[in-house]
Image (tube, helix red, strand yellow):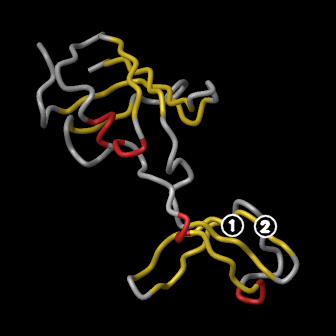
Amino acid sequence: MAISAGDKVRMHYTAKLEDGTVVDSSEGKDPLEFDAGSDQLIPGVSNAVIGMEMGEKKTVTVSPEQGYGEHHAEAVQQVEKSNFPPEVKVGDMFKAVTPGGEVMVRVTEVDGDNVTVDANHPLAGQTLIFDMEIVE
């Protein structure tokens, strides 16, 4: 029976960048479980399973608009290093308080007295390739 919007789905997947770099996978883990067509996952994956059947495999290309969104340059800012712990390093995550509320930021550069932080999702602006297999 074909999957319909709202159906509970369990699938194995591998997510890659266009150059083939694997960025996430369920290999060696339990299958990913979600409701088809819901906002529990990025739309490009959640909607792609609709119409698939048990055991079916499919590869989908997910644009930034259907994935983690476009990369917004204004979400990248330099902040004085004194606002961070002395051991701050690239890749660290921090909660930042903005006029719009709290957001998570990732440190992308530590340079002298400044730290560059990015509030974009790490995969923002990327086209992703998902290899999917419906297991339940």
Return the disc, 1 or 2, that comes first in the chain's sequence: 2
Mark seen at residue 107: 1
Viewport quadrant of the N terminus: top left
Q: Judging from the image, what secondary structure is the residue with disc 2 in?
A: loop
Residue in the picture at 17% in, 19% down: 51
Check the image and report above or below for 94 versus 69.
below
Viewport quadrant of the C terminus: top left
> Residue 52's spot in the image, x, y percent?
22, 17
Residue in the picture at 75% in, 62% down: 90
Given the image, on which type of amino acid does mark 2 rest? Lys
> Residue 22's spot in the image, x, y percent?
60, 30
> Closer to the camera, 63 or 122?
63
Residue found farthest to the front: 73
Q: Check disc 2 and report the residue beneath it.
A: 89
Rounded to the nearest angstrom, the CA distance separating label 1 from label 2 is: 7 Å
> Residue 103's spot in the image, x, y percent?
47, 73
75 left or right of 46? right
Given the image, on which type of amino acid does mark 1 rest? Val
Q: Quadrant of residue 4?
A: top left
Residue in the picture at 62% in, 65% down: 106
Residue in the picture at 63% in, 75% down: 77
Q: Give yes or no for contact between labels 1 and 2 (Cβ–Cβ under 8 Å).
A: yes
Q: How many marks?
A: 2
Mark seen at residue 116: none
> Closer to the camera, 79 or 1?
79
> Residue 5's spot in the image, x, y percent?
12, 34
Q: Residues within 10 Å of mark 1 (few under 14, many from 20)?
A: many
Check the image and report above or below for 108 versus 45.
below
Q: Quadrant of residue 13?
A: top left
